[in-house]
Image (spheres, rainbow, N blue to C red):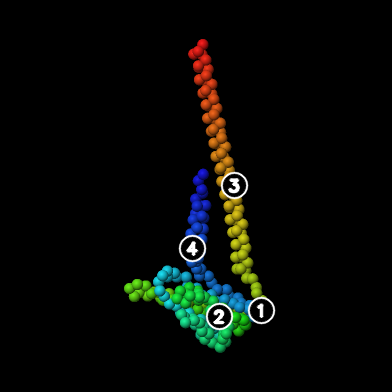
């Protein structure tokens, strides 16, 4: 029985991504709504892979309050660790990125005890320098902006609801597709089995008929 081409593609797709799961990195956008009094993660990711190439990275976070025109420096991070740069966020920012300072891909930070004054625009400057052979350096710069709104109570946006509905629809569709494939394969196997039984019965019938004919011919010769 031949396996459908689209099933082979699905298996290949899954195997490739499962094998690479440990090193996966997704440049997802940060959430944009925080709840007052809770914590909130500001995301900033650079997924450029460097394998065994040596490198270094620096991260700078800036904040512009809602209604203001200027940014001010709030946090910095390098191989020595992180430093809060403004009194407004003193003891309220934790590093939430990659723990190994010599291989930073995630430069996210975490705001503790969010207040309404934290509404505004955050900007992440993520500078990675990769050192290759022959004194060649590659400079990878990520400049990400996050517009944050602080609310009193968590709300579910339309995009979140649509995304959840689409996820369930996809799961149900995949299950139905797999069920149809199973039924199709079962029918093919059953049909092949019936055909084999018919062929075997025909072969046995022909063998019996041939033997009977030979026996009749022998009787006539004997007479």
Q: Can see residue 111? A: yes
Instruction: Classify 10 Å Cα crowding around label 3: few (below 14), some (14-19), many (20 and above).
Output: few
Q: Secondary structure at mark 3?
A: helix
The mark nearer the N terminus, 1 or 4, is 4
Closer to the camera in the image, 60 or 206: 206
Quadrant of res 202: top right
Residue found farthest to the bottom: 87
The residue shown at (48%, 75%) is: 100
Nearest to the eye among marks 3 and 2: give it. Answer: 2
Q: Are marks 1 and 3 in contact (CB under 8 Å)?
A: no
Instruction: Classify 10 Å Cα crowding around label 2: few (below 14), some (14-19), many (20 and above).
Output: some
Q: Secondary structure at mark 2?
A: strand
Q: Can see residue 60? A: no
Quadrant of res 66: bottom right
Q: Are marks 1 and 4 in contact (CB under 8 Å)?
A: no
Which residue is identified by label 3?
183
Nearest to the eye among marks 1 and 3: give it. Answer: 3
CA gap, disc 4 and disc 3: 32 Å
- Image x and y of residue 68, in percent: 55, 85
Which residue is identified by label 1?
152
The residue shown at (60%, 65%) is: 163
Nearest to the eye among marks 1 and 2: give it. Answer: 2
Which residue is identified by label 2?
94
């Amino acid at each position: 029985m031949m396996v459908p081409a689209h099933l082979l593609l699905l298996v290949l797709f899954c195997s490739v991504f499962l094998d690479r799961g440990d090193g996966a990195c997704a440049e997802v956008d940060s959430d944009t709504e925080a709840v007052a009094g809770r914590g909130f993660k500001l995301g900033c990711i650079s997924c450029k892979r460097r394998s065994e190439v040596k490198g270094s990275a620096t991260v700078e976070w800036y904040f512009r309050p809602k209604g203001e025109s200027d940014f001010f420096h709030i946090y910095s991070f390098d191989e020595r660790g992180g430093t809060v740069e403004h009194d407004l966020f003193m003891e309220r920012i934790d590093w939430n990125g990659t723990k190994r300072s010599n291989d930073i891909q995630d430069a996210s930070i975490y705001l503790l005890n969010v207040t309404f004054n934290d509404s505004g625009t955050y900007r992440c400057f993520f500078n990675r320098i990769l050192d290759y052979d022959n004194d060649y350096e590659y400079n990878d710069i990520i400049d990400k902006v996050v517009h944050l709104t602080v609310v009193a109570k968590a709300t579910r946006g339309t995009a979140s609801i649509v995304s959840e509905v689409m996820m369930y629809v996809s799961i149900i569709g995949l299950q139905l597709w797999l069920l149809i494939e199973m039924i199709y394969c079962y029918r093919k196997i059953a049909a092949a089995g019936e055909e084999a039984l018919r062929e075997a019965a025909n072969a046995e019938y022909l063998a019996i008929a041939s033997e009977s004919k030979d026996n009749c011919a022998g009787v006539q010769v004997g007479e």
